[in-house]
Image (spheres, helix red, strand yellow):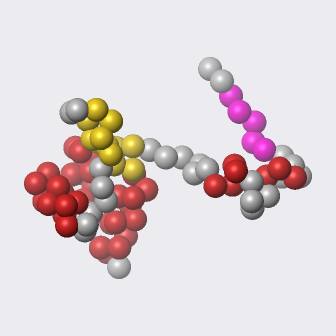
Amino acid sequence: MATFDQPDAKDENLGPDSPLSKVPVLTRLIRLPEVIARVGIKRSTIYQRMAEGRFPKGRSLGPKLTVWVEAEIDDWIRSVVS
């Protein structure tokens, strides 16, 4: 198993313009059953709202596999609550 050390804060290559500063720390992809459980709406409503631009778009990873970016779902939930 590979391990990675935390970057040294003194490293000049890790400033705000560094390519590493733009990489998300953790991007998790979630499948439809978890999306449904998190947002509390059914599959048909999710796809209808996606078509209307009112819900984050899913990404197709294959002919029968769609995933959503967890952070986008979390942002959508926050926008609905506020």
> Going 75% across and 36% down the picture, which residue do you hit?
5
Identify the residue at the far left of this view.
44
Percent across and percent down for residue 2 are: 66, 24
Percent across and percent down for residue 1 are: 62, 20
Read off the magenta span.
3-7
Q: Nearer the viewer, residue 43 or 78?
A: 43
Q: Is residue 41 visible?
A: no
- In the image, taking residue 25 as reference, residue 58 lies left or right, namely left
Q: Is residue 39 visible?
A: yes
Percent across and percent down for residue 52 are: 19, 67
Q: Quadrant of residue 28?
A: top left
Residue 54's place in the image compared with 2, above or below, is: below
Identify the residue at the far bottom of this view.
82
Residue 52's place in the image compared with 82, above or below, is: above
- In the image, taking residue 55 as reference, residue 15 lies left or right, namely right
> Going 83% across and 50% down the picture, which residue do you hit?
13
Is residue 4 one of those drawn in magenta?
Answer: yes
